[in-house]
Amino acid sequence: MVDIKSMNLEELTAWLKERGEPAFRGKQIFKWLHQRGATSFDEMSDLSKALREKLSAQCSIGRLEVARKQMSQQDGTIKYLWRLADGNCVETVLMRYQHGNTVCVSCQVGCRMGCAFCASTVAGKVRDLTPGEMVDQVLFTQLDSGEVISNIVLMGIGEPLDNMDTVLRFLELVNCSEGLNIGMRHISLSTCGLVDQIDKLAQYGLQLTLSVSLHAPDDETRSQIMPVNRGVGVEKLMDTCLRYFKTTGRRISYEYAMIDGVNDADWQADLLARRLRGAPAHVNLIPLNEVEESPLKPSRRVAAFQRRLEERGVTVTVRRKLGGDIDASCGQLRRKAMRQD
């Protein structure tokens, strides 16, 4: 069966023309799939019955089912556990800000990166998501919540640059004016630091924000909590990030989860400031969400670490903690469901 939702508009139009259909059918069907959230061809009332039957015989439309849904009583954050067609589950989070609603999207079922502070990676990677499954997280979150989504962060379950071709197609689909029409400058992509893929991404010149999950400025600490660092090293990663900035002109955001007694010392703040010299950068300090399977605890030195960085000329913010009462850490809701199942 053809995965019609993962086609871009041009591919869909060409595919239909090859089967004797006029070009305008491409836009009609694309809008049904990417704006209205149709889950069957029978819903497409402006298509002939014969065409609907033909499409049903040849194509599949993926759909997500709400396996669990939690809403924070503190800040209105909604966390979805979506069940995919094959029974696997992924998480999506709707976060409300003054500047608009942001949805945090997953790109894989599980993750193989092994970061010590992340619940997503506990059971490893199961499979990559398809572009259509990624689009559906945004679309069905919007339809279910009744809230317009204006921003996307690829910071859910999985490593986006470990599923790069799918992610690039997803970005194309959500950016399309006939679909969700979300601009690249309203999208952030987070990576744990796959240097070859960062170089490859730079060549596309996308106007999104690249967020690098740094979490430590020294190799000993970063390799301890992020296995991906063992084959690369912080210095090589920072050189790659500098190349990315020079190629794209886009400032990089560095994510830094504050872990008690691990990466929150004054000397690490000083080293981080030195690492960031030479290119515009923004550091986003993240109060750690505790993960049941991990011994790591939230730092008590977030404010002191922030001050030390600012004194050394680094632009710093502290991420507002959302959804603390609804399994806030990425992957926690999925892990809980897996244990219960």
Image (cartoon, grey):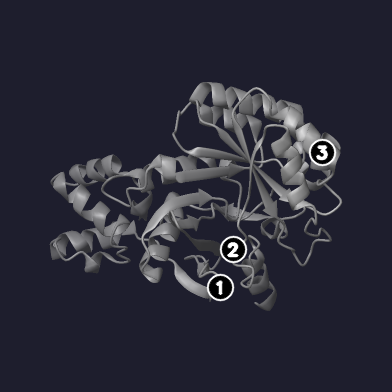
Residue holding disc 1: 72
Q: Secondary structure at mark 2?
A: loop
Question: Can you give x and y, in whole percent of width and height, for residue 83 in the image?
Answer: 51, 68
Q: Amino acid at mark 3?
A: Gln
Residue holding disc 2: 322
Give the CA distance from mark 1 to mark 3: 34 Å
Front-lying residue, 242 or 309:
309
Q: Quadrant of the N terminus?
A: bottom left
* Callouts 3 and 2 close, C-beta under 8 Å: no
Give the CA distance from mark 3 to mark 2: 26 Å
Who's the residue at 79% across and 47% down the image?
Answer: 225
Q: Please give the label number shown on residue 268.
A: 3
Question: Can you give x and y, in whole percent of width and height, for residue 291 in the image?
Answer: 74, 64
Q: Considering only vertical position in the picture, is 148 above or below 107?
A: below
Number of numbered callouts drawn: 3
Q: Amino acid at mark 2?
A: Leu
Q: Considering only vertical position in the picture, is 47 above or below 23?
A: below
Can residue 21 be seen in this snapshot? Answer: no
Can residue 93 be seen in this snapshot? Answer: yes
Give the CA distance from mark 2 to mark 1: 8 Å
